[in-house]
Image (cartoon, helix red, strand yellow):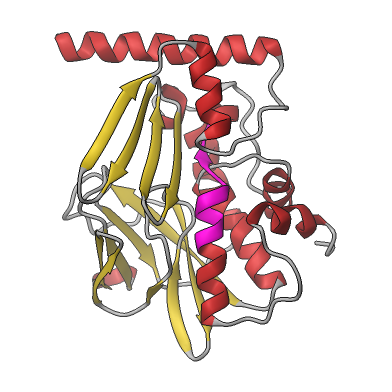
């Protein structure tokens, strides 16, 4: 990739001037990424899933878009490498089952070595750590959220990240290095299959030091680790698109009037189906 394609990405992160790899710099980059580049599946909902080539993701971030793990961690890894960090990509898998020990390939995880230390780095979980975690077994507290890393035994030989407060309390990843080609098949499934959660439900997340902002369909939530979630239902398309741009920082200039109608229609339909399922 040419240097120029990273300019817009760095501006999006609020990073200016020269950058020397350091643990402090890595932490600042992850914080900025989580605050300014949302986890989102808007284009998947509109039936035009973007590819996961890191150059495409980098350009999208510079233009104000977001993505899900293959985009977010794929683009972030490319940026970190460009800045001189030692980055390794890993095949991972997120699970609802807290005792899961498999690795199904539906997540791209990263580790980074800098200043003689290895870190678990992830900008693609949506509700994951605000800062990198040392890649060693232990429990880590960040702003009221508690995470844990432990060795994943057996044939996979990797790591398990525990996020007990989230909807997917486990993410396992293999220690072996991976290439972006290894995620192509799973990306195709997640972004096009009718039973994929990314097809069924719009989800947008943003993480900062104070908590997690989450938009799932028409329900906007702020999750505070001390107070718990505060939710409100968005009652109109105007509120919905204001939240996308104002709360999550997602530029909307790529959405035509027809796109907005189609997206809001999908969100309303999914919301009504969700309400019906709760009453059943």
**Rendered position, 214 above or below 220:** below
Residue 202 at x, y percent in the picture? 45, 26
Question: Within the image, what quadrant is residue 213 found in?
Answer: top left
For residue 196, side relative to residue 181 (left or right):
left
Q: Is residue 143 above or below residue 250?
A: below
Quadrant occupied by the N terminus: bottom right
Which image quarter holds the C terminus?
A: top left
Q: Any magenta on residue 39?
A: yes
Residue 206 in picture, x, y percent from top left: 46, 44
Left or right relative to 200: residue 188 = right
Residue found at the very far bottom of the displayed protein: 116
The magenta stretch spans residue 188: no
User: In this orientation, which residue lies closer to the viewer: 52 or 270?
Assistant: 270
Residue at 40% across / 17% down in the picture?
Answer: 234
Along the line of sight, the residue nearer the viewer: 41 or 186: 41
Against 174, residue 97 (above or below) is above
- Compared across the picture, whether 45 is left or right of 223 comes to right
Residue drawn at the location 58% of the way across and 39% of the way down? 249
Query: Residue 77 appears in which quarter of the rendering?
Result: bottom right
Q: Nearer the viewer, residue 129 or 180?
A: 129
Q: Residue at x 52, y 78 (%)?
A: 24
Q: Left or right? Give the position of 146 relative to 195.
A: left
Q: Position of residue 66 (x, y in %)?
A: 59, 42
User: Residue 62 appears at what percent x and percent y?
Assistant: 72, 48
> What's drawn in magenta, residue-wise?
31-41
| Number of numbered discs on residues | 0
Q: What residue is at 76 percent from the left and 59 percent from the top?
A: 6
Residue 174 visible in the snapshot: yes
Residue 223, compared with residue 131, is above or below; it is above
Q: Is residue 106 visible?
A: no
Q: Nearer the viewer, residue 105 or 84?
A: 84
């Amino acid at each position: 990739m040419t240097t120029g394609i990273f300019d817009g990405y760095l501006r999006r992160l609020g990073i200016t001037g020269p950058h020397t790899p350091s643990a402090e710099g890595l932490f600042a980059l992850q914080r900025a990424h989580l605050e300014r580049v949302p986890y989102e599946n808007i284009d998947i909902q509109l039936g035009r899933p973007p590819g996961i080539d890191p150059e495409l993701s980098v350009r999208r971030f510079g233009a104000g878009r977001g993505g899900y793990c293959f985009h977010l961690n794929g683009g972030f890894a490319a940026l970190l490498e460009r800045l001189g960090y030692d980055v390794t990509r890993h095949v991972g898998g997120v699970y609802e089952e807290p005792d899961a020990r498999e690795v199904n390939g539906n997540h791209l995880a990263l580790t980074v070595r800098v200043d003689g230390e290895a870190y678990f780095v992830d900008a693609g979980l949506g509700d994951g750590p605000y800062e990198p975690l040392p890649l060693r077994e232990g429990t880590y507290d960040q702003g009221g959220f508690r995470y844990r890393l432990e060795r994943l035994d057996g044939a996979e030989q990797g790591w398990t990240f525990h996020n007990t407060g989230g909807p997917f309390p486990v993410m396992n990843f293999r220690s072996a290095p991976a290439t972006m080609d290894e995620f192509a098949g799973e990306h195709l499934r997640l972004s096009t299959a009718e039973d994929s959660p990314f097809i069924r439900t719009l989800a947008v997340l943003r993480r900062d030091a104070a908590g997690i902002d989450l938009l799932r369909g028409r329900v906007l939530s702020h999750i505070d680790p001390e107070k718990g979630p505060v939710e409100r239902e968005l009652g109109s398309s105007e509120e919905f698109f204001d939240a996308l741009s104002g709360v999550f920082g997602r530029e909307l200039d790529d959405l035509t009037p027809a796109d907005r109608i189609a997206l809001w229609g999908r969100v309303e339909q999914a919301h009504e189906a969700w309400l019906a399922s709760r009453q059943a």
